[in-house]
Amino acid sequence: MNFLIRLLVTALAAMLSAYVLPGVTIKDFTTALILALVLAILNLLVKPILIILTLPATILTLGLFLLVINAVIILLASNLVKGFKVDGFFWALIFSLVLTVVSGIMHSIAGGDND
């Protein structure tokens, strides 16, 4: 049940973030739900591999390279999900930051448990 709530919150946060950012477009809420699911899968499978492969750069930049990895995940998701478009790396980076902040705020409002 908690996973479904997280998916819904992420989809709503993605819609809100895309509304605010002119370089990101999401066609409809169904696309946002699919995007939330794809992002969950990519964060589960691809992100750990990227973190391990780029560990020296992450250590050298004191963790700031993780922002680049998040942007790459967003760009990969934009290639996989029809109806979700990001205009470039800069917009993917900004979208990942805004999505993280908005979904965190929405999840705390929704009363999700801290697991």
Image (tube, rainbow, N blue to C red):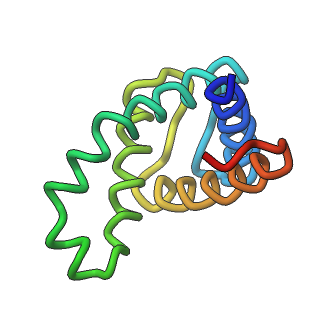
From the top left corner, tell me how far across and down residue 31 is, in percent.
62, 22
Q: Nearer the viewer, residue 22 or 52?
A: 52
From the top left corner, tell me how far across and down residue 68 is, in percent.
35, 62
Residue found at x 14% / y 55%: 53
Q: Which residue is farthest top?
A: 30
Residue found at x 28% / y 38%: 46
Q: Is residue 60 above or below residue 13?
A: below
Which image quadrant is residue 9 in? top right
**Horizontal side of residue 9 vs 52, given as left or right:** right
Q: Is residue 96 above or below residue 59?
A: above
What is the total number of numbered labels drawn onto the structure image? 0
Q: Is residue 66 above or below residue 19?
A: below
Residue found at x 32% / y 69%: 65
Residue found at x 47% / y 53%: 92
* Quadrant (top left, top right, bottom left, bottom right) of the N terminus: top right
Q: Is residue 107 above or below residue 91?
A: above
From the top left corner, tell me how far across and down residue 32 is, in percent.
64, 28
Q: Nearer the viewer, residue 102 or 76?
A: 102
**Horizontal side of residue 40 vs 3, given as left or right:** left
